[in-house]
């Protein structure tokens, strides 16, 4: 059920369920589980979403473009050590 999932509210890129910047912690865990064994596909998917978020967030506030979207969308997907 979508109402219980941690999905983004576009164009704000906040979590529909908890209100945190998306991808929130629960969304990250869900994505890691969904893409288990295929981190390359997850990184590709998140890179596309990062670019979409950049466009949306920049259009909402052109005088203050978003910062640190790479960390928010991609850096947490590192392979486990």
Image (spheres, rainbow, N blue to C red):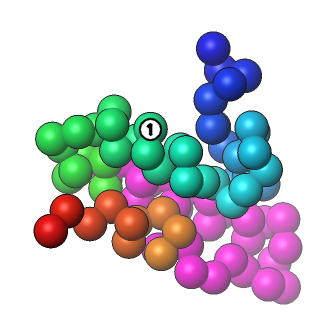
Give the magenta-colored segment's residue range.
44-70
Q: Residue at x 24, y 45 (%)?
A: 41
Viewer-nearest residue: 73 or 78: 78
Q: Residue at x 42, y 53 (%)?
A: 46
Outermost front residue: 81
Identity of the residue drawn at 63% across and 82% down: 67
Q: Is residue 70 above or below residue 36?
A: below
Q: Answer above or below: position of 49 versus 37.
A: below
Q: Where 65 falls versus 46 (above or below)?
A: below
- Quarter holding residue 75: bottom left
Q: Quadrant of residue 69?
A: bottom right
Q: Is residue 9 visible?
A: no
Q: Nearer the viewer, residue 48 or 5?
A: 5
Q: Residues within 10 Å of mark 1 (few under 14, many from 20)?
A: some
Q: Position of residue 10 (x, y in %)?
A: 73, 45
Q: Quadrant of the C terminus?
A: bottom left
Q: Is residue 12 left or right of residue 55?
A: right
- Closer to the camera in the image, 14 or 55: 14
Residue 62 visible, this orientation: yes
Chief SS of the magenta region: helix
């Amino acid at each position: 059920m979508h109402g219980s999932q941690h999905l983004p509210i576009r164009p704000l890129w906040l979590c529909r369920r908890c209100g945190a910047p998306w991808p929130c912690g629960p969304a990250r865990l869900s994505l890691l589980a969904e893409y288990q064994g295929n981190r390359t596909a997850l990184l590709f998917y998140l890179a596309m979403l990062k670019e979409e978020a950049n466009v949306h967030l920049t259009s909402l506030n052109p005088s203050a473009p978003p910062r640190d979207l790479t960390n928010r969308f991609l850096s947490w997907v590192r392979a486990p050590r």
